Amino acid sequence: MNKTGKTWVAAAWVLAAALTGCDGHHDMPDTSMKAAHILCAGGETMSYEDCVAQGKEAVAVVFYLNHDENVAGTGYAVYLHDLAPEAFADSLGVAQGTSADLTAHDGNENTFALYDTQDVSSPMAVQVFDMWRYGQSAYVPSVAQMRLLYAAKEYVNPYIEACGGDPLPDDTDDCWYWTSTEVSGQETAKAWLFSMGSGAMQETPKLQAHKVRPIVTLYNEE
């Protein structure tokens, strides 16, 4: 963990000690999921400190808590590592069935649509479907979900690094990722790239190979 992350953790422990040490009263630990909690290989989410203390294998970092009853799940976690650059589609001329909605949190549905389209294959979607081995479904985030991840980058990066992952980049030459959202009106040819360096978007021919940063929807009780 970098200096900022270590300072934050130390401050948290000092505050906890101050609240419990003076009168001997000990509150029950708060086990609810929080942003920057760690998703472990067994499906549990917990603080980084608990993950280390229990010897758990870290898989992803929670970057968003959902309080909208119309959106599936209780939050999202981002995987520790990028996937290698792949094409959105292996040929042009076919709409692959995503919503093309820039405001929808539907990366899971989009990724399945890409995987399930019969007339064209999506190397990107196939790679994501093949990666998960713990019983939950990883997927390529939609544009709206990438915006949430970009907004959370500053506070999740220290935990990604502490867990041995690849921090979300700032470098102009290394910051572009596929989303799972096709470009409305041009679905047969283009999809959206998203910059983790600036939050910008770029409509891009599907045959180009770009990185993917998978996420997962969490269903933990709050």
Image (cartoon, grey):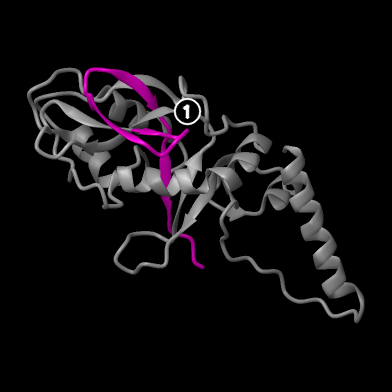
Q: Is residue 161 above or below residue 61?
A: above
Residue 145 drawn at (x, y percent): 37, 47
Please state if 2 lies on the left or on the right of 213 as rendered: right
Q: Is residue 219 magenta?
A: yes
> Element under label 1?
loop
Label 1 crowd (10 A; few <14 / some 14-19 / many >=20)? some
| Viewport quadrant of the N terminus | top right
Q: Nearer the viewer, residue 193 or 113?
A: 193
Q: Quadrant of residue 98?
A: top left
Please state if 28 lies on the left or on the right of 38 as rendered: right
Image: magenta residue range: 194-222
Query: Residue at (86%, 67%) from the top-left corner?
Result: 17
Q: Is residue 207 above or below residue 216?
A: above
Residue 23 drawn at (x, y percent): 90, 81
Residue bearing the label numbered 1: 82
Q: Amino acid at mark 1?
A: Asp
Q: Is residue 57 visible?
A: no
